[in-house]
Image: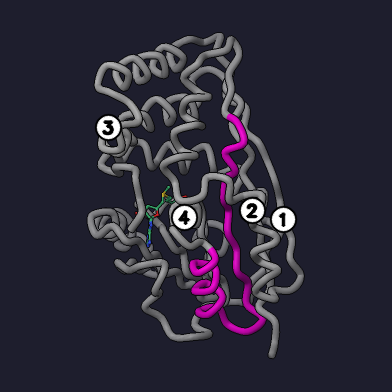
Amino acid sequence: MTYTIEETDLERQHLLAQFLEPVSLHALKNISLPKQATILDIGCGLGDTTLLLNERFPDSTITGLDGDASLITTATKETTLTHPNLNFVCGDAMQLPFDNNSFDFVFCRYLLHHLRDPLHGIKEMHRVCKTVGTVFALEYDATSIISYPESWAYPKLKDFVTILFADALLGRKMVSYFRSFKLVNICYDAQVILADQNSALKRFYALTAPALGKALLQKNLIDEKGLDEWIKELQRCERDPETIVLMHPTIAVWGTKAEL
Ligand SMILES: C[S@@+](CC[C@H](N)C(=O)[O-])C[C@H]1O[C@@H](n2cnc3c(N)ncnc32)[C@H](O)[C@@H]1O
């Protein structure tokens, strides 16, 4: 896998889910599924997206898949007792362990920009989606991350993810990529998040710097001292009630798998 973030900090993943929930629901409210639909959530992490899908489509059966076995173990422990319609498997988004035409709804959030070949990831999503089922992806486009009062720490974060992630500018390409698979009825929803004090986003960014630290040091993109200063500046902004952060756009795209 090309994944460059250490996901040992579970708080960070839950914070991501917290600030992305309204954005995700805004797009998901447009989706209607058949009764007792089968759903696949690829790159489900701790299962926050799987639970969100369960909330939105309560009579469905949902499979969460992730490449990180420890996240799958935690997701299984935390959710399956209370939600018997959910199940979790460890697997690779680039080679999904499912037959063609298996799911009514194939979903991912913040996964494809980590894949070396996102088009292949979409191809796999398309393959396992049933004919007239829906393929859905929510991705970001790291155009800019800025704050007011201005801090150097946020543009630096944007620069680092642009270098480290397989394609941090994937958001803008998603509609075109979906078209290339002959998906029909393609729709999209683009949003930005403005973060005020006590926001999950500001804390998420402060925790993202240490999570990227190992990869940044390994690639000589920063030294220990620089990393420490960067983390401290993000923590200062997190504590400062005056600092407002404007996140890059998030783009949800969905389309129907056409009949042959
Ligand atoms: C940023 S997290 C997103 C988690 C969740 N979808 C959400 O939005 O809250 C990305 C997840 O994708 C998983 N991942 C990355 N590359 C993968 C691959 N090739 N196959 C399966 N999972 C992958 C990571 O382990 C991580 O849990």
Residue flagged by tag 3: what amino acid is it?
Leu
* Residue at the image point whose x is 46% and y is 29% from the top: 157
Q: Is residue 174 left or right of residue 204?
A: right
Per the image, the residue denoted by label 3 is 217
Name which of mark 2 and mark 3 comes first in the sequence: 3
Magenta residues, as a range?
119-144
Q: Position of residue 256 (x, y in %)?
A: 68, 74
Give how far apart the Cα atoms at labels 1 and 3 are: 37 Å
Instruction: Please state which amino acid type lies under the numbered disc 4.
Output: Leu
**Is disc 3 surrounded by few (<14), some (14 to 19) or many (20+) residues within 10 Å?**
some
Ligand 1 image-quadrant field = bottom left
Question: Which dot, 1 or 3, sits closer to the camera?
Answer: 3
Residue hosting label 1: 188
Left or right, residue 175 beside residue 58 = right
In front of the other: 243 or 114: 114
Classify mark 1: helix, strand or loop.
Answer: strand
Residue 36 visible? The answer is no
Q: Amino acid at mark 1?
A: Tyr
Residue at 45% from the left image edge and 51% from the top image edge: 166
Q: CA distance from mark 4 to mark 1?
A: 17 Å
Percent position of residue 212, x then y: 34, 35
Decide which of tag 4 and tag 1 comes sooner along the chain.
4
Q: Tell me if the residue at label 4 has its CB under 8 Å from ligand 1.
A: yes
Residue 252: which disc? Answer: 2
**Above or below, comparing residue 46 to residue 209 in the picture:** below
